[in-house]
Amino acid sequence: MAQVTIYMDNNLEKKIKELALGAGVSISKFISSALEQKVNNNWNPETAKLEGSRNEFITLEEIRASDAQDACRETL
């Protein structure tokens, strides 16, 4: 397995540590999973579990290419 050294600012490091702790994984595993999802363009397992009755997710490219408009916001 390859080892990689990365440099990041302290704020990003803090956020990654918090997210990894919350996910119950090591920082290395958290970053590796995030990169794998980005490279493979997949939904993360937690999101996939929420999907429910559909057999397949729409791809991120299909979502990004969509001309759908956001719903109008209610005025406060």
Image (cartoon, rainbow, N blue to C red):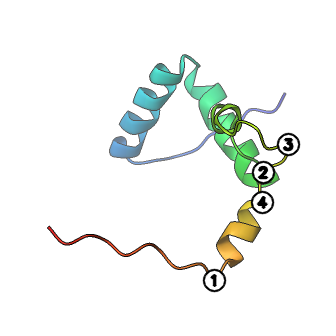
Q: Which mark is residue 57?
A: 2
Q: Circle 1 sits on which residue? A: 67
| In front of the other: 46 or 34 | 46
The amino acid at mark 4 is Thr
Cβ atoms at labels 4 and 2 below 8 Å apart: yes
Quote the CA–CA distance across marks 4 and 2. 6 Å
Q: Residue at x 75, y 69 (%)?
A: 62
Q: CA distance from mark 3 to mark 4?
A: 13 Å
Mark 4 highlights which residue?
59
Residue 35 or 55: which is nearer the viewer? 55
**Which residue corresponds to the image point at 79% horizontal and 44% vertical from the top-left?**
54
Q: Identify which residue is drawn at 70% across, 78% down.
A: 65
Q: Quadrant of the N terminus?
A: top right
Q: Quadrant of the C terminus?
A: bottom left
Cα gap from disc 2 to disc 3, whole angstroms: 7 Å
* Above or below, comparing residue 12 to residue 45 in the picture: below
